[in-house]
Image (cartoon, helix red, strand yellow):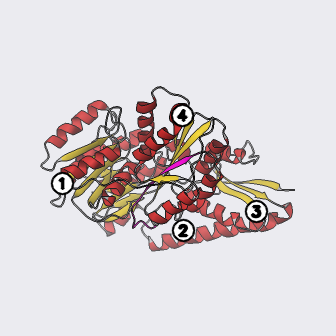
Amino acid sequence: MSHFHVELRPGAYADSVALLQVSRSVQGIDGVLAAQVAMATPLNVDVLTQMGFAVPERATPNDMVVAVHLRDPARLDAAITGVDNALRDAGRRSEGATEVAAPRTTAAALRRDPGALTVVSVPGPHAMVEAMDAVESGSDVMIFSDNVPLDHEVALKRAAAERGVLVMGPDCGTAVVDGIGLGFANVVSPGPVGIVAASGTGCQQMLALLDHAGVGVSSALGVGGRDLSSTVRGLATREALRRLDADPGVELIVLISKPPAADVADEIADVAAGLATPVEFALLGPGRPDLTAAAEAVLRRLDREVPDWPAERPAGARDPGRGARLHGLFVGGTLKSEAALIAAETLGADHGHTFVDFGDDAYTAGRAHPMIDPTLRLEHLRRAAADPETAVILLDVVLGHGAEDDPASLLAPAVAASDRPVVVAVVGTATDPQHRDRQVRALVEAGAEVHLSDAGATRRAIELLGERA
């Protein structure tokens, strides 16, 4: 008989990426059916409960929870030894990094290397301390952290504006600075386009489409998904536009954002009109072009040919059955927003279709981003595939440095297990470390239809819904 084991370790802590590695290490131990080692945040407790673990009610986010599902309870000692060994190894790696990074504060490090770009990746509520150190030192800063309070973001960006410093983020997952990719950046060639993006995966979609069309990008400056909100008011976007306008290698600037505040978009349009470099707007919203249409507009402004965007179909077609719902399960917030906008414009009022962004702050508190840890989305994918109301499933797979090494290998079994059509947007370039073509091939062999364009994938999913919509 199988055995579920749960134990709390009060006060123990490791970051989400280290805990993901520990979980995967323990899952490979003989006799372990499933394992999750995580901080006991409400989200993680909910996930563990759905997996069948009984987490004690006294658990708090300051506790580490070790949950192991064993084929035989006699394997428990070996599994716990595996957990301890994996945690110890993770700790050793952290100690090694500390030995290399001798300065104990951001300000101390910047005194050794003035003007260096600072990357902040600490729990969101604590990011402001490190980021403000960088700003006050005159250093540009990329804040990878999510869950940063909005008032912290405003304070940081106001301080940065006074000093002519660029704050990228918070929740800035992608940037290309001086030809170097940061975060989840794709591998692209240098070229005439400069990007300002209040959107990580929107930036990656533009990088992937332009790369497929043979157009390079010199810089991609992420400014955080809230920068064009009515509260932040484009503080970082203004500085990023100024930087790219001053770059003689940039012939055309592309500004990408999730749906912005209308008055802020108008203010930024006025700023853009005063620049010497032309600006192409790719601002999502009702009645506005999708990102693929925006990429095509960029190509036409550069007098480049618009190619056919790749789409690969499996050998056999799946029947949507009697279901009537489209389930969109995304790791990219902008890709999710784009799909939801296209569906709303095409299908009209809500008919029970769902679009979920597993990279949203609500799903990443105490967990690694789903581009690193796909556990949560895989669980929802299995549920959607088993739901008789499901007609079509829509997914994204976002490649690039920092993302999961081989996302298709984890996703393909769940795709193959679904008897409903699955349409996937694989956002990446041919030279990304995950080898885009290999990822596409694995998903198609599992039965998915794969597109490079998220908008193209969404319209195909809607087409498969047919009269059920």
Q: How many other residues sit within 10 Å of disc 4, few (<14), some (14-19) or many (≥20)?
A: some
Q: Look at the image and say whether residue 426 sits in the magenta stretch.
A: yes
Looking at the image, tell me whether mark 3 or mark 4 is earlier in sequence order: 3
Secondary element under disc 3, as helix, strand or loop, is strand
Residue under the image location 58 percent in, 39 percent down: 391
Looking at the image, tell me whether mark 1 or mark 3 is earlier in sequence order: 3
Q: Amino acid at mark 2?
A: Ser
> Is 419 positioned to the left or the right of 403 in the image?
right
Q: Which is in the foreground here, disc 4 or disc 2?
A: 4
Q: Quadrant of residue 80?
A: bottom right
Q: Are marks 4 and 1 in contact (CB under 8 Å)?
A: no
Name the residue carrying label 3: 32
Name the residue carrying label 2: 94
Image: magenta residue range: 421-434
Q: Which is in the foreground here, disc 1 or disc 3?
A: 1
Q: Residue 209 location, x and y as percent? A: 34, 55
Looking at the image, tell me whether mark 4 or mark 2 is earlier in sequence order: 2
Q: How many other residues sit within 10 Å of disc 2, few (<14), some (14-19) or many (≥20)?
A: few
> Is 394 positioned to the left or the right of 67 in the image?
left
Q: CA distance from mark 2 to mark 1?
A: 50 Å
Name the residue carrying label 4: 353
Q: CA distance from mark 1 to mark 3?
A: 57 Å
Q: Is residue 160 visible?
A: no
Query: Which residue is outermost to the top?
Result: 349
Q: What number is the disc on residue 303?
A: 1
Q: Which is in the foreground here, disc 3 or disc 2?
A: 3
